[in-house]
Each structure stands twice: as structure tokens, then as C-alpha cells.
Amino acid sequence: MERGSGATQSGEGPAVFEPVIVAFLCNWCACEGADAAGRARLELPANVRPVRLLCSGRVDPQHVLEAFACGADGVLILGCRPGECRYREGNLHAMKRVALLRRLLGPLGVETERLDLEWVAAGEGKRYAEVVTGMVESLRALGPLKPQSASTHTTAKAPDARTKVEL
Amino acid sequence: MCRIGVYICECGPNIGRTLRLPALVQSTGNLTGVVRVRRVPVLCGREGLDFLGEEIVAQGLDRVVVAGCSPREHESTFRSVLERAGLNPYMLQVANIREQCEWVVRDRDQATGLARRLVAGAVARVRHHEPLLPSEIAVSTDVVVIGAGTAGVRAALTLAGKKRVVHLVERLPCVGGKVPLYEDVFPGMACAACVMDPMLDELLHHDGIRVHLMSSVEELLGFKGNFTVRLLQSPRYVDPEACLGCGACVEACPVRVPDEWNPGLAERRAVAVPYPGVLPSLAVVDPRHCLRWQGEDCRACEEACPFDAVRFEEEARVQEIQAGAVIVATGFDLSDPGRFPQYGYGRLADVITSFELERMLNSSGPTGGRVLRKDGTVPGHAGFVLCVGSRDPRAAPHCSEVCCRYTLKFLHRILAQGAVDRATVFHAGLHLPGGASQDLYRALEGNPSVHFVRMGAPNSAGILEQNGSLAVRFPDEEGRVRSHLVDMAILAPAMEGASGNRELARILHLETGGTGFFDQGITLLDRVEAGREGVFVAGCAAGPTDILGAATGGQAAAGRVLSELVPGETLRLEPVTAGVDETLCSGCAVCEGLCPYGAIERKDDPPRIMVNRVLCRGCGTCAAACPSGAVHCAHFSDGQIAAEVEAMLGREDQGERSKEKGSRIAG
């Protein structure tokens, strides 16, 4: 069965680790930026799983933890540039939450590079492509998210989260 | 059990060149809840839409997934199809396999794998969709307009033209704002009174407009369509029905105080008709200076009035008004140049502001239209100093928009009437937008009496007294200090938000920017957005603009009100908003401070919060912050987001397990 994490590319040569990234996209900027990348036929890695939300401020830290628990190797939150949030400062709330989450993820054994927040404006198809490609490349280098903890996660409930701490 | 139909659009030749559609159809058919998978050549075309509608009915579908282009293209189109076919429009999810898959992934296997995950995510999500219904509320279509300057009056007349009841609230005892105090207005050198008076007459005689003078908004309760506005009206101590503005009372008044309408130029009495030509033409008693409020029993004005119009017994009045919308048109004030001591304003007699010159040039003003120094002599050489505070990050970072143009106006006026022999303009780059302003400038080119001198930077000049003249000193563009002697210096102070704006912002729950303007809601496509539903901002209240800009802003704000609040129509509330599960809410109110729209209110007994659906715009930052999962977000619920994420990560095929609460770790 296709798994989120640890998939490798088949074919000639050495197998390359292909990370899976969940990207939470603001409807008003990053979603449009991603579409702009598509309209421009830019080449993007197939590793990104986009989730459309009305605002990056909607991303609950729990959504991020669930994504990791379900096998994501990285989580990307893409919002409007500061000062351009459709809802004034949802993007800034997202920034604070990401800062806190990264501090929590470190001790849990999740490298902080696995969670990133970037600003992508509606017209910035090229920037969208650069951001997602850059993250895919850095996660390829980093490797899968702790195979032992990721593989023991069959569900994403609280006991599992505690197990991860004990590990 | 769900009955989900998945429709894969081929988008003509656009989808399927890279994606292997047969494989996508096959894997989609195995997803939980899917009863139907079809490929359609062009789903957004007439035939495709008809087909989709027929399928929903024929297959008895209760949910639909469309895999095709971006939801930003056709989500609303497909929602309409669902609605026509008897399904709630929110039972749809769109998987973007075109822009975010077909068009960007080159490898066929990888693209097909990604598309499978995108469709699986959409199917898992749509299983958690719930029907959402817009709700409707009755609204008042009356409007409160705050400020009776150019913007407020244009707004009021535009609204009244469509039979809206308008309450025009003005803190001064007269209407018209600042423009009636000028002699001419740029760019056409039109007579200010000729422009304004007919409009103000129409205003004061309009049946649909109630003008509340000497009034201020003390409280704003409620929300769009249902505001309650509390007004406080100060007493005029003069009966407007009886007074004709003849001025007999003014002659009799023994008190003399500086005249705010002619700063530094004239005195007025404690009872006054504000300025010649004022509308409405009525006297007003100033209790800050009238002897009766200093404990004396003076009745000079009362005795002098031929119409028995004086009413010392009058008291302040409070009234409540129901309204559907509020337009803020409070205009601007000129900043005090005394803030920058280097200009010598207030210390050097013949350093004046542009407003003082406006009053001098006004033919019915304190000097009868003559430009005079403080000693009564005529200045030979006038210096105009621009950007006094403007464009300086330490003072007013903005360009005040109008100073360069009104300075050209001054030049034309004073040269035409021979008020001065020479004029020099000290500027840091002239801002003269529009053809008419350029004409005004060109007409001065080559005039030997006018000199334009470039300063090195805005707000960089200083003025010193030198042998009975004024020396204007500034570094030029090469940094060399230059000095020019003039007899009178006219400063162009930065415009800033009207002095009452910060207090008004508190009352209206709006924000002002650093220079006191209501400019925080403005976007490139919307200069009247104030940042709160049902409240709009017009004219200089939103930032510096000229008379035409103010008038246009008033009309634009009125237009928004006319299109959003229509008599006989209810207000349709979008269903994608936050809501609260009161059994989970502890009333911690973390969300309250985060809401950018003031849509969340904390209640007691028991402590809990409530979401006002009129004000909520559905961003969901409250739901993201709620520590107990009590705040939920319609159509973007935790369960829906978690289901989509899990399925896209390949967790969807693990059989049916309860996702009613998603996979919330704490839930």
C-alpha cells in the first residue's frame, strides 16, 4: 500500500527518498499562487498535498500534529504577506503558532525544518514553486520522519503522542 | 451511508495527457462512500452541467466531488448545479487535479499517484460535509453619516436621492466643512462658495436628511443592518426656528476671544455667527466664554435679539437612532507646525499656515481678501514652504496630496490681485497629478515674479528672523545650506486625521493609523472599507485627498450602503462562519481578542462566548486558538480538515472508522 512517508522512487539508479508534505494554503493568496504556478506550467514535485483553508490563521497546531502523526514528513503553511491578510492578521497569528510549535516539536524528535511558514502572494506562482521545491529538497536530504515513531502510528490519538515523548 | 458521485473533468485536452485517467477512475471507485465515478469531457460546459444535474437526481447522490480545475474557477458554478438538483450547495468538494497536478507534474506515474491522493482527500472530506443554509435578518436602511464636510454631504445627498433616511451628524454648529472658508478652489480656480453653497442649500432643505449639528456619536451598539447610535447634542442656546443670523446679539456681546475660524487674525464674541456666509446662518452661544457661565448675570445678547431667539435654559440632548449603516466622514485637521520649532511658527509674527492665508484671501474674511503682515503692511515677497511635516517618517510619513496644488492656487490668486510683488515656493518635488493641475503650473512658468526652489528633503527648512525679514534656510540637493529672504512665510502643514478620530475610533470599534486617519481597512480596490461590516469611511477621514476625492468617496460609501441594504430585503448571512458548542466553552475568551471583526462577545452566567454571525467572516483563527475545541468553523471544521489530510496521506483506505470528531488528539 502507498504510504505517506518513506516512499522511494523506483527506477534505475539508487532509490531516492520522496518526502510527503502537507501544505495548508490560504484561499486568497497561496492557493491563487499555486494555481498561478499551474497556469504557468512550472514544474513542481508531486510530493505536496495541498489543503485549502480560508486563512493561514485557521491552521490549528493540532492539524499540524495530526499531519505528522499520519505520516507527513513535512508541513508547510502558506499565508499572505504581512499586511496583506484578507482577515487583517490571521497570517501573524499563524506565525506565532508556528514559532511555538517548532519549539515543541524539537524535543519530540521532529526536526524543526519539517515545519515551515512562508508568505506567497496571489501572483507569486514562481515563489510558490521555489518554496515547495526547496522544502522537498531539504526533506529529501533530511530523510523520513523518525521511522520508528511514524511506523508505530496507526491512529493519531493522544496515547500515541505520549508514546512518542517516551521514545 | 453516503452516496458520493465523483466526476472527473477532462477539461477538453487539458487533463489526461499526463494523468492516467483510467487508473484514477479505478482507484476512485474503491473509495468509501463512492457510488459513481464518471469521466466528462468538459464538465463546466452547458452539456456537462446538465449531465451533472441529471446524475445527481438519477443516482440519488447526496454528495459530489468534482476533480478538475481550481475551485476558484468553477466551485460556485457546480454549487449552483447541486442547488438546482435539490442538493445543498455545500455538499460539494472540488479536487484541483489541473493547476496543482496535471499542469505541474511531468512524470505520468507520479502525477497519477498525486491525483489519486487529491481525489481521495476530497472524497474523505466531502463525507464530513454538512448542509449549510444562509440565514436572513431584517435590517434598517437608515444611515448615520458622521461629518458634514464635502464627503459627508455628498454621501447624504446620494443616499437621500434613493429615499434613504439620513442622519447627518456634525460636531460644529454649521455644515460644509472647510471648503466654504476658502476663496478659490483648485484646479479650476472656481469660487468655493459657488461650488459649495448650492449643495449645502439642497442638503439643508432636503426632507430625507436630518442634520444634527453640534452633535457627536457617543456610542455605537449592534451590527450591520441593526445599529443603535447614541447621539449627544450640545445646546446652541439659540432657537434655530427663530434666529435669522442677523448678528444683533454679536454686536451686543461684551466678551472678546480669539476666533477659531480666523486663527491669529481676528477676535470673536462669546455669541457668534461663525463666519460670513455660514450655513445655516445661525448664532451660537459659547458657554466656555459667555459671562453667564462665569457667574455673571449678563443678558446683553438676549436683550439685543429682535426675535427673542436666545435660550439660556437649553440643555444637552441625548437621542438614540436606529440605523443599518454608518459612514465616517470626519475629514482632516492641519497639524500644528509649532511641533517643529525650527519653523518659528507662533514665535515669528509673519510665519503663518496655509489655512490662515486662505482666510486672508477670502473676500469676506477678516482682512477682506488682502494679504497683510502682522504690522498691517503688505509683504513684498511671500515664501511658500511645502512639506511641513509631510513625507517625513519622524512626523507624517504620508504626502498630504493637496499642498502643492493649493500653493499654485495661492500663487495665481495673489499675483492676479497684486497682493505681493514676488513669490518663492520651497518644495521637495512637486506633486501635481492630473491635467488641470499641470495647466495651473504651466501658466506660471516663465512668470518672473514666481520662483520654484528645490529643497534637499521634505520637512528640512528652518526660518530665522534677519533684519526685519524672514530667512528661509534649507540644505539643497547637494547638501549646501541655502538661505532666501522673504517678508512672509506660508507653511503647508501635514494633514492628519481629524482631532476627534481616535476617540471616535474607540466608540466605533475601528482602528486609526499612525496619523489618525481611518485607513486601516483600505485596499487597492476599496477606499471606503473601514474594517467593520456596515461601517464605511469617506473622504479625508480615510487619508488625504482633494475635494473631488472627498466627494467621490462620499458617493462611493453611499453606493456601498445602497447596494448592501435595500428596503424590503433581508440581509443574507453567509453560512461559512464560526460557531460555539456551549457545552465545551469555558468562556476563557482567548478567541475574543483574536477576532479582527469584533464578532465574538463574552457572556456571563455561565461564562461562554457567542459569535455574531453578521460580523463573522469565517477566517477561523478563533477555532484554531480555542483550547477546548468549543469553537467550530462551518465548512472548515477540524473533522473535515483532518479527514482530508489523513486521506491525502494514504490513511483513507483503512476502512470505516469514526471521524465525526476527526482525529483530534485531544478529542
Image (cartoon, grey):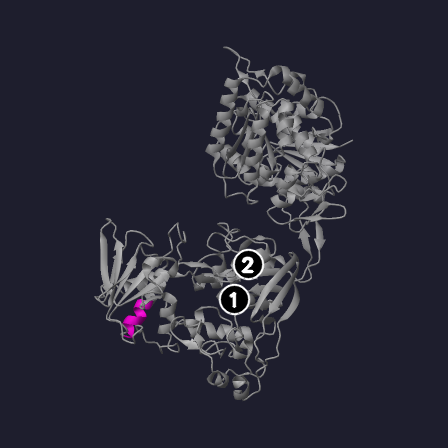
Q: Which mark is residue B503?
A: 2
Q: Nearer the viewer, residue B189 or B399?
A: B399
Q: Nearer the viewer, residue A14 or B250?
A: B250
User: What segment carries the magenta color?
Assistant: B410-417
**Tag count:** 2
- Whether residue A67 sits left or right of residue B358 in the image: it is right
Dot 1: chain letter: B
Dot 2: chain letter: B
Residue identified by numbered label 1: B154
Q: CA distance from mark 1 to mark 2?
A: 24 Å
Residue at image x 52%, y 34%?
A34
Residue B430 drawn at (x, y percent):
32, 57
Q: Mark 1 is on which residue type?
A: Arg
Q: Quick one: SS at disc 2?
A: helix
Which quadrant of the figure contains the C terminus of chain B? top right
Q: Mark 2 is on which residue type?
A: Glu
Q: Is residue B411 magenta?
A: yes
Residue B116 drawn at (x, y percent):
63, 25
- Whether residue B402 sits left or right of residue A112 in the image: it is left
Q: Is residue B490 above or below residue B67?
A: below
Q: Is residue B205 above or below residue A8?
A: below
Q: Is residue A46 above or below residue B459?
A: above
From this viewpoint, is residue B242 visible?
yes
Q: Nearer the viewer, residue B430 or B455?
A: B455
Residue B664 drawn at (x, y percent):
70, 30
Picture quadrant of residue B206: bottom right
Magenta span: chief secondary structure: helix
Q: Is residue B282 magenta?
A: no
Q: Nearer the viewer, mark 1 or mark 2?
A: 2
Residue at image x 65%, y 49%?
B599
